[in-house]
Amino acid sequence: MKKISKLITVGFSLFMFILIAENAHAGKPKYIFKVASLAPEGSVWTKRFRDFTDEVKAKSNGEIDFKIYAGGVMGDDRAMYRKLRVGQINGGGFTMTGIGEVVPDFRVLGIPFMFNSYDEVDNVKEKLMPRFEEEFEQKGLVLLAVSEVGFVYTMSTTPITTLAELKQSKAWAPEGDPISQVLLETVGVTPIPLSIPDVLTSLQTGLINTAFNSYYGAIVLQWFTRISYITDIPFAYAYGAFVLDKKTFSRLPQHYMELMKTAAKTHFDKLLSDTRKSNEEARQVLIKNGITIVKPTPMTQAELQNNYREKTVEKLMNEAFSQSIYTEAATFLDNYHKELSESQQ
């Protein structure tokens, strides 16, 4: 009986030793990813990203860990990319504007007045994803997910319902975004290029009186405190990319690579729903806070969606993005409309 008791004691001790050793091992990550983002801490974007990192850490038994630098503490998109290239960070959540300088064809979904619904966006984006992934890889990057800001709208201190009113505005254009800049110039506006962190201050000082953001983005970044009107037509679709340095990512064992990809798809798909819900709710919050929604005149809307969009594309083709990516995107969009029309007959 004593022998049995002793064996039980020894066995329990061995079990506890293994458990402690495993926990100690779990507490020492083998792979650490330093990831930066402009997204503010506490926003839906950072919340979902932390859900993603929590799942990866748990399922890798702590062997993969992350250091997250949110809220632009690592600088704007350009600064983050420079730090990624020299190894100060291993990845980031980039805006389309920022990462579009590295992978120009990624800009194609952001052409102003190209999309009118999320169904259109989702259909085209899904079909373009394999090409996007390949082009990111050619630049030494792994595209783990496409994030979303949503449709952005013209937000201003005075109502903008006509082209004449738009031409009189002091409009912001995202620094490094040739598409918005060329469209505004084509309309007759001289845009003022600024990085995203500089927009609120510029609205406060009067350097600009017109900016472009999603409903939710305007609240999170506090831009709504300096604007009074929103023009009720999507200016463009805004999105981003969660990317990792390919060299760092390739050091992972194959099963951890798959874990990262699967977890990213799960949580960024949820983020898509979160963002769209947040934008719906934010619209009502903005209205309750005294923001007035104004409609453009039918002629203005038609001019922007057809004439000025096409002129902008013609000027930017093979400079801001390739002709082939635009042709693909436009074909996918036309096919979607045809299929939709046939299904409704």
Image: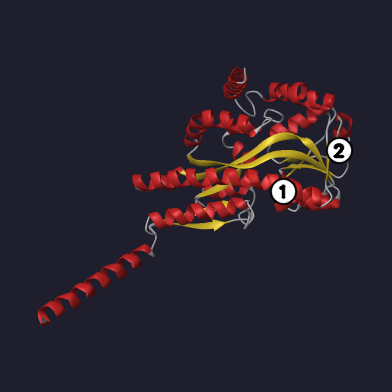
**Residue at (57, 25) in percent of width and height:** 325
Outermost residue toward the bottom in this view:
2
Query: What's the amino acid at mark 1?
Result: Ala
In the shown orientation, is residue 230 left or right of residue 108? right
Residue 273: image tag: none
**Residue at (59, 49) in percent of width and height:** 80
Label 2 neighbour load within 10 Å: few <14, some 14-19, many 20+:
many
- Observer-side mark, 2 or 1, equals 1
On the image, the x and y values in percent for residue 312 come to 72, 25
The N terminus appears in which quarter of the rendering? bottom left
In the shown orientation, is residue 322 left or right of residue 59? right
Look at mark 2 in the image and give the residue it sits on: 169
Look at mark 1 in the image and give the residue it sits on: 282
Q: Is residue 108 above or below residue 338?
A: below
Label 1: which secondary element: helix
Residue 37: tell me if it is visible.
no
Quadrant of residue 250 within the rendered picture:
top left
Marks 2 and 1, how far apart in space? 25 Å
